Amino acid sequence: MNMGGGHRMGGMAAPAPSPPAGAHVGGGGMPGMRRKRYAHMTFFWERKSEILFTGWPGADGGMYALALVAVFALALLLEFLGSRRLHALLPAAPAAGTGKRRAAAGGARAAVHALRTGGAYLLMLAIMSFNGGVLLAAVAGHAAGFLAFKAGLFGDGRARVEDGCGKEELAPAAF
């Protein structure tokens, strides 16, 4: 039954034809070559993966180890960027003084905050590769950074938690 307007009622359209063998199948690379992509949506435990960049680290064990070291180092750096030790090294905004000194001090703190936020997003994206080794490297890096910069090696042995009232307490253990 034709109701006008050029619409057809009835059967479904045929599926689009598949590309011929050896044809380029999206995603970059050389034309005419098929490339296998790794798209895991659950955690997996193998070295063949892609972390942050297309094709990196791939199937090479040495590059995978380098990627894990990079993730560990990034997590450690993020703990340092969030530590009070770093904030003590940054210039404080003078209570009274020139606007330039206040702007410079605020700019330095804003730059550290931007680095910390950007690094945290990069680390999150690396973890979203769903590789179990990457997750363990990130957790180990955060733990080592917490130990080094907030609870022990370079601090006074107390984990500091800001409660908004200006007093410090030991960080509660989460079970």
Image (cartoon, rainbow, N blue to C red):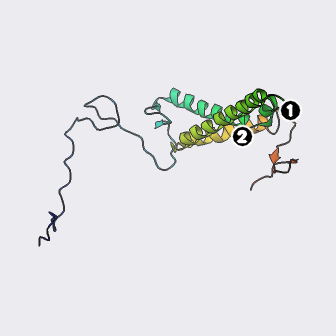
Q: Position of residue 6 (x, y in %)?
A: 14, 63
Q: Give the mark count.
A: 2
Q: In the visual, does 11 lie left or right of 121?
A: left
- Label 1 – label 2 distance at C-alpha: 39 Å
Residue 45: x, y in percent?
52, 43
The residue drawn where x is 74% and y is 33% is 106
Question: Residue pushed farthest left?
Answer: 1
Q: Amino acid at mark 1?
A: Ala
Residue position marked by numbered label 2 in the rendering: 143
Element under label 1?
A: loop
Write down the quadrant of residue 137 in the picture. Answer: top right
In the structure shown, which secondary structural element does the residue marked by tag 2 occupy? helix
Q: Is 96 on the left-hand or right-hand side of 60? A: right
Residue 29 x, y percent position in the rendering: 33, 30
Q: Residue furthest front?
A: 98
Label 1 crowd (10 A; few <14 / some 14-19 / many >=20): few
Which circle marks residue 96 in the picture?
A: 1
Q: Residue at x 79, y 38 (%)?
A: 150
Residue nearest the viewer, comparing 118 with 102: 102
Left or right of residue 82, residue 23 in this image: left
